[in-house]
Image (spheres, rainbow, N blue to C red):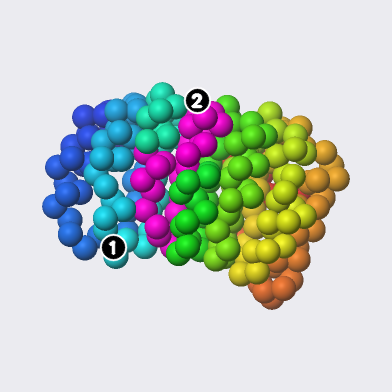
Amino acid sequence: MTKKTVTDLTAVFLAEKVLPRIKNLKSFICDLSRTKVTGKSLKAFAQANLASQKNLETFRFNVTQATFKQEEVSQFLSVIPNVKDLLLGFGETNLTDQGLEAFSTNVLPYLNRLERFELGFQYSKVTDVGIQKVLVNLPSNITNLLIGMNSLKITDVSMEGFLNERLPSLKKLQELRFGLTETKLSKDVKNQISQWREKVVRDNDIQKEVTPFIQPQGESSAQ
């Protein structure tokens, strides 16, 4: 089976027939990027209620290039489990601020176990409003923050409340990587992000390259 042959039928079967039979799930990694899945699959995974899996520590879900309605992605994001490692790949989709609204304000701030957080928004329809709400509502325990925002129509407004307030409060941060190519961010803001990234590396005495699970186009850091 190749990715091009994977449809909602496959994804829904996994969500409805397979997942309910697994009682002690610790890690869930589902790469449906560049397949033919739609919002029907998102709804099925939302109804699978993975949040009830008390031992779940890793949740990685990638639907790059999928098509869906905003209410479908909103429903899916509203039941994201409280895990340590969370990846959400929505690059090259029609995701908008509306689809992120409930997650940013009602779910994300309460993910108090979250340490590694990776988001793929590149080439989507998310704007300043959506990015800003995600960034200012980040939980405090995050150690690794990676967000692909390449080719988004975002400006310096997206970073308001983050660079000067929320970012300095993330005391456990060990890694900071933003994909910001082909955005409307000013050189000054990009430099601030780069300086913060260097500070994080310096403070933690680390220097390592990370290969993201999401494979955004363009650079993966703000240079």
The three-letter code of the residue at mark 2 reads Asn
Pointer 2: what residue? 94
The picture places residue 116, in percent across and down from the top left corner, at 51, 60
The picture places residue 138, in percent across and down from the top left corner, at 58, 54
- Left or right placement of residue 23 versus residue 192 in this view: left
Q: Nearer the viewer, mark 2 or mark 1?
A: 1
Residue shown at 28% from the left, 63% from the top: 54
Q: Are marks 2 and 1 in contact (CB under 8 Å)?
A: no
From the viewer's side, name the closer residue of 197 and 128.
128
Residue 130 visible in the picture: yes
Q: CA distance from mark 2 to mark 1?
A: 32 Å
Q: Quadrant of residue 16?
A: top left
Work out whether 148 lies above or below 193: above
Q: Residues within 10 Å of mark 1 (few under 14, many from 20)?
A: some
Residue shown at 75% from the left, 34% from the top: 155
Pointer 1: what residue? 54
Q: Is residue 80 magenta?
A: yes
